[in-house]
Image: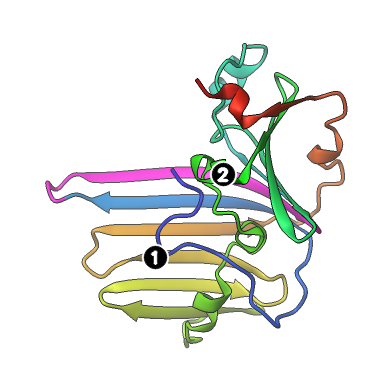
Amino acid sequence: MKRVTLLMAALCVAGSAAATDLDVKIAYYSKVVTAEGVVREARYEEKMLRRAGHVWSSRVLPAHVEEHSNGAPHKHFNHVVLPRHVILENGKPRVEFVDAHAKEVVRVPPAEYDNVSFDGSWDHAYYLLDSKRLKAMPVTARVSSVAGARWREREDKGLFERVLWDDQRQVPLVIESGDKAATFFNRMELTVQPTLTRDLPWQKLKGYSQKEYSDFLD
């Protein structure tokens, strides 16, 4: 599943307060009802570390998958299960994936971003919201249980978007999108962790071999 789905693209809000360092857990849920009446649901979680110039995100995998992976040869590149590291360099993002078992850092060139579900936007990686779309969404009277966070919502041609935006921490706490006919629904919920990770994973890559995405192509 792509990291950014329909109506869930993301940027920061221009002119807002400066963003803070964050450790968050992100829960994704999607539901699709086909024309044949088949209901397909998907759930997964990710962890994200946000620091100045760095965004590290990793899929939360079942324990049996983690155990099976330990020590196993990694012959294929699967960007979904590998931690993604987005670095801001000279105003542009650079993307790499880290395989801790093989001790490899796989660098992905811009021409291949689509193949790893990255849209090339640093703001999308860092803030998880689209500033233009967010500013166009009116603040509603819907009650928020989080101090400093307000709901913004919009509807257009049977489609809806809802965002619970935390102005202080500059992050969406909830993003929902779907259609009024209930044929699809997406929800992304962030839980901000109470403490920050000090032992940052991108600072522990000394000795890792450097690979290119093309090394894994047939």
Looking at the picture, how far across and down is residue 112, in whole percent? 55, 41
Asked if residue 144 can be seen in this view, the reply is: no
In this picture, residue 43 sits left or right of residue 11 = left
Q: How would you classify the magenta stretch by its main secondary structure?
A: strand
- Structural crowding at the residue carrying mark 1, measured as other residues with C-alpha within 10 Å and reported as few (<14), some (14–19) or many (≥20): many
Identify the residue at image location x=72%, y=76%. 168
Is the image coloured rainbow, by chain, by secondary structure, or in one colour? rainbow
Give the CA separation, mark 2 to mark 1. Answer: 29 Å
In this picture, residue 19 sits left or right of residue 26 = right
Q: 154 and 4: which one is in front?
A: 4
* Foreground tag (2 vs 1): 2
Identify the residue at image location x=50%, y=45%. 114
Residue 116 sits above or below residue 103 on the image: below
In this picture, residue 170 sits left or right of residue 183 = right
Question: Within the magenta stretch, is there residue 48?
Answer: yes
Looking at the picture, how far across and down is residue 26, in whole percent? 58, 52
Asked if residue 61 can be seen in this view, the reply is: yes
Tag 1 residue: 177
Looking at the picture, how far across and down is residue 11, in whole percent? 60, 68
Question: Within the magenta stretch, is there residue 151?
Answer: no
Q: Secondary structure at mark 2?
A: helix
Sequence-wise, the earlier of marks 2 and 1 is 2
In this picture, residue 160 sits left or right of residue 192 = left
Q: 147 and 160: which one is in front?
A: 160
Three-letter amino acid code at the position of disc 2: Ala
Three-letter amino acid code at the position of disc 1: Ser
Q: Which residues are magenta?
A: 35-54
Circle number at residue 111:
2
Q: Quadrant of residue 91?
A: bottom right
Identify the residue at image location x=58%, y=37%. 60
